[in-house]
Amino acid sequence: MSTRHILLGLLEAGPSHGYDLKRRHDERFPQARPLAYGQVYTTLQRLVRDGLAEIEGTDADGGPERTLYRSTGAGARELARWAGEIAPPAPFVANEIFAKVVVSILAGGDPAAYLRAQQDAHKARMRELTAVKTDPGADLATVLSADYALNHLDADLRWMNTTAARLTTLTAEVDTA
Amino acid sequence: MNHRGDTMTDDGGSPAPLLAGRGLVKAHGRTPALRGASIALGAGEILAVTGPSGSGKSTLLHLLAGIVRPDEGSVTYAGQRLDRLPEQRLTELRRTDFGVVFQFGQLIPELTAVDNVGLPLLLAGASRAEARRRAGEWLERFGVRGQEELRPGELSGGQAQRVALARALVTGPEVVFADEPTGALDSLAGEQVMTALARTAREAGTAVLLITHDAQVAAYADREVRLSDGLVLPAEVAA
């Protein structure tokens, strides 16, 4: 995830200071890890260094003085470029679950038991995410973010089902290779 | 919500489940569907039963809902043996205590949405005006507004299924049996149906036995068991 582009996007709404950007980020992406203040300020400094943002001034507002940042024309162009860029379809080939199944076969372990336990863990996480999105107070951003994770976990589960059903063949293949 | 999950622990000291099947055996002709399945549903609990098609999920639902009697084993509901009740009492109990939703809502095509939902109330002796008033409230809870006077054929699949849910819940049942309730819907309509079912059941403290082969649907439940070779896994410790 590109923190710099997300901050640039939030700055498009108007000048803002670091604390406010962090708060809006965490609201807008409720399922994402909250941004650390340090990360926000470091990123803002780099955006200024690269000419994508600039300092608008300072704002005291009765409290400590805070620096206001705004996006530049170059920042807006960079944001448009990034937002329209195709995210690479993830290859998903080097996945940890598959590696564990193969290693378990090599080591004479119980890959079927591992897969069952992994499926249970996936399902437990899916119930948690579903509870989050079914909460009457959940906004659409929360629902969509949970759906994204749910669909990926569901894909893992379906892959694990197929793999569990084909362990005998896989074991023969791994053992003779 | 207060009696979810925690009533279902395997410690033997937990309260008796609301609905339990023990050692259920059922064959269709010579094909065994269930081979000693045991399952327990707590009051207010949403329990998903998953498993591949043909694993006996629907047969289990029919036995637990008292629609079909087991070849062997027992079904206990609120302390009474369902499998031993005379047919007439069973029919009455199904009407007062159980609600059922199938993959295809099985609404009555000649009746409007509001009359479909009100039908169980009429059967229970409510006046037509009262049945329509309460049915209208339930349709509103399920987000079916402005379509009260439409017939099932004029509703979308998702709307029809929400009407079917309203009909299953309108009498305030203790248990709703849902057999692949989203099986015929696209994913967005399915999500709306499941959200409506889960929220409403939790608010009303209604237990739900949810049959599904879809992990995303099962995730609406508090707990999941799966059917494999006619048995329920993980096996429950008999209470």
Image (tube, coloured by chain):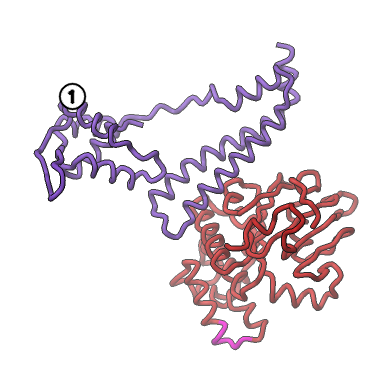
Q: Colour of chain B?
A: red
Q: Position of residue B88 (x, y in %)?
A: 81, 78
A45 up-or-down from B155: above or below = above
A136 up-or-down from A150: above or below = below
Residue B55 at least partly seen? no
Q: Chain of mark 1?
A: A
Q: Residue at x 22, y 39 (%)?
A: A18
Magenta: main secondary structure equals helix
Q: Residue at x 59, y 78 (%)?
A: B118
Q: Position of residue B120 (x, y in %)?
A: 64, 77
Residue B164 quadrant: bottom right
> Which type of secondary structure does the marked residue at label 1 adopt?
loop
Chain letter, colour purple? A
Near-viewer residue (B162 or A130): A130
Residue assigned mark 1: A50
Magenta segment boundaries in residue numbering: B126-131
* Image quarter of the N terminus of chain B: bottom right
Q: Is residue B108 magenta?
A: no
Residue B114 at least partly seen? yes
Q: Is residue B188 left or right of residue A52?
A: right
Q: Is residue B110 left or right of residue A42?
A: right
Q: Position of residue A34 (x, y in %)?
A: 36, 40
* Image quarter of the C terminus of chain B: bottom right
Tag 1: Cα neighbours inside 10 Å, few (<14), some, or many (≥20)?
few
Disc 1 marks a residue whose amino acid type is: Asp
